[in-house]
Amino acid sequence: MTMSISRQVALQLFLGVIISQSAPPTWIYIIDGTGVRYSFNNLSVTVIAGQQHDITCEAYGANPHAVLEWHVPDDMAVVHQDQSEALQGGSYISRKAVAITPSMNDHGKILSCITSHPELKNERLRSVHLNVHVLPRDVVLFRTGGNQSNSTVLNVQEDSPTSITCKSIRSFPATKLSFQLTSGTGHTDRIPIHENSSIKRNVLDDALFDTESTVTIHPNIKHHGKTVQCYASLEKHVVGFTSATVIVYGPPERVIMSSTVDLYDGIEINVTCRSLNGYPAPHIHWYIGSRNLTEDSSLKISENNAGRYDTESTLTLIPTRFDHGKRLLCLAVQPTRSVNQSLVLNVTYNPAVSITARRLTSHKASGTTELVLICEADANPPVNTFVWLCNETVVPWDTNNITLPQTISEDATLRSSVFAIQNQLSKNHCVFNCTAESEYGSGSATFDSLYSYVIPNPPSVFIIYQHQTRSSSLFVAWQLGFIIGQKYQSESIDNVINKHEIDPPNVIVIIDDTGIRYCFNNLSVTVIAGDQYNITCEVYGAMPPALLKWRLPDDMAVVHQDQSDALQGGFYISRKAVTITPSREDHETILNCIASHPGLQNKLLCSVHLIVHGMDFLFVIFFREYQ
């Protein structure tokens, strides 16, 4: 078909316009997988080893389109993609991509994109070199010096400085580590590292690096339940993360005992003791002196909002007059430390009355005897009135043969009424009754004057030889339980104490040479082989002094020291120390301190279980009555 002249002219004009608009590309870019354009040569593109990255070459403003060609090192894992064209605003945008999977060996290699076009005399080149990052194989968090496996929980001791290490393993280049401490509410505390990071070549691949950073924290209760986070970064990008929850072991913040209501002899009451905010949950033990009352108590443990434990124990107590003035102790026991609270018992009880008699002189010519009667009443509140009866009749004080009774206050609860009779007892037989009255109640005791015939004459003098007794005190009782003698201090015969009670010790403890007292069970005792230690056994509240004896293995290096006794507040504190130099062979050895006393049916035993190595002290003590 013949084209008309008009159409030929139009086609020629159109082709002329096309030819007149032919142009080379105006911009050539290399674009990484994140969309960043690189318009200059030899810029660095960061890629991750082992991950696929799409790298695209783009040419803008060409007409007709440009031809793009990638030059990639032969040993690089690469997939070439087809070139694409897009017509925009009368010119072409040309794109050609490659998908690379770099390895560590590709670090620093160059990727080049060559652009050609009919309007270009020379090909244009765009190039980038690869900055290959190797992500850390693992990031672990652990207690410094412990197993280098990742811990999700870090157990620390309250007020004990603790070092925590974060380790980034097998990265390139070396990572930078940072710590944070966060709470469940989202509050974050950044933890300074204090220039304690270290970078080492990995032992399995020396082209890669291991990075360690250690931080020391001083844990307190507020840190409990918080999360320690460790971030590993490469060029300000986080490439690794791990975290662990901090569990702070520590005693309760407070131990609270309920204020007791009025206490009465023989009447049951409940006493409550609460320990707050401890971890792990403490167990509560109850003591009056050395008497363990824990079996008479109940225990309730609850977890609070902070993830720590509150413990409540209720003691069912039937107080007696013998408990008056003693200390009721609530002891919240944990594996390493314990906290206690105590109160002094004020027990109300009726007068406990007894009569003792003394025959002071005997006049053989006249056949008369002076008989002294002592009525003692122990009561709380104390006795305010004594009434003496003879054969159920009030004793007549107007006779010359009877002296007016005297009331003597011996201590806070003990009162005595004393009077003397001068008469021929064989002609005046009498059953004496002494009634003691207090604001709370009354009590009475009787004495038959016939018993005066069997009261032997007391010795006129006591002679004490110090080398024949190790005790600093001596009691002399004279027949039928009537206490005739008095108590003398052996170091001074003239120092007479007008007391005749026998009180057993109520506390036995062992003290290390740092001054810490240990009196509860199941703690470990750690000593260092070859070092010398002074260990002291102490007992409190005895009258007369208790006798202490250390029972140690025969093959242990030990020096025994003399016992000392100190009078304080009407009772004795007795101490006896040993100096030991443990060896490795003394590991698991038990040291026993035994306390004996006239007022004890069974001896008291306090035991120390030795763990011998190079750590600091920690005593484990067992306390029980020793048969």
Image: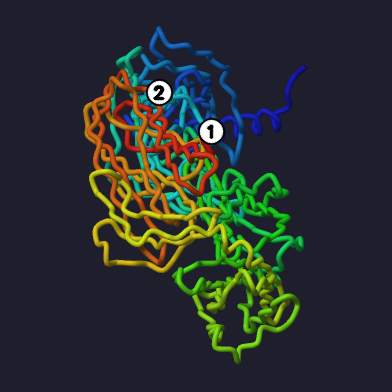
Residue 475: % across, % down: 41, 55
Q: Mark 1: which amino acid?
A: Gln
Give above or below for 285 relative to 212: below
Label 1: few (<14), some (14–19) or many (≥20) C-alpha neighbours in 10 Å:
few
Q: Number of labelled discs?
A: 2
Residue 446: % across, % down: 68, 68
**Could you tell me which residue is drawn at 61 percent across and 78 percent down?**
382
Q: Mark 2: which amino acid?
A: Glu
Query: Is there any visible trace of residue 35 in the rendered image?
Result: no
Q: Nearer the viewer, mark 2 or mark 1?
A: 1
**Could you tell me which residue is drawn at 69 percent across and 82 percent down?**
439
Give above or below for 405 relative to 80: below
Q: Which mark is residue 438?
A: none
The residue that mark 2 highlights is 588
Residue 573: % across, % down: 37, 55
The residue that mark 1 highlights is 627
Q: Quadrant of the N terminus?
A: top right
Q: Is residue 443 left or right of residue 579?
A: right
Spatial separation of the CA atoms under disc 2 and disc 1: 23 Å
Considering depth in this image, is 314 or 627 the residue closer to the camera? 627
Label 2: few (<14), some (14–19) or many (≥20) C-alpha neighbours in 10 Å:
few
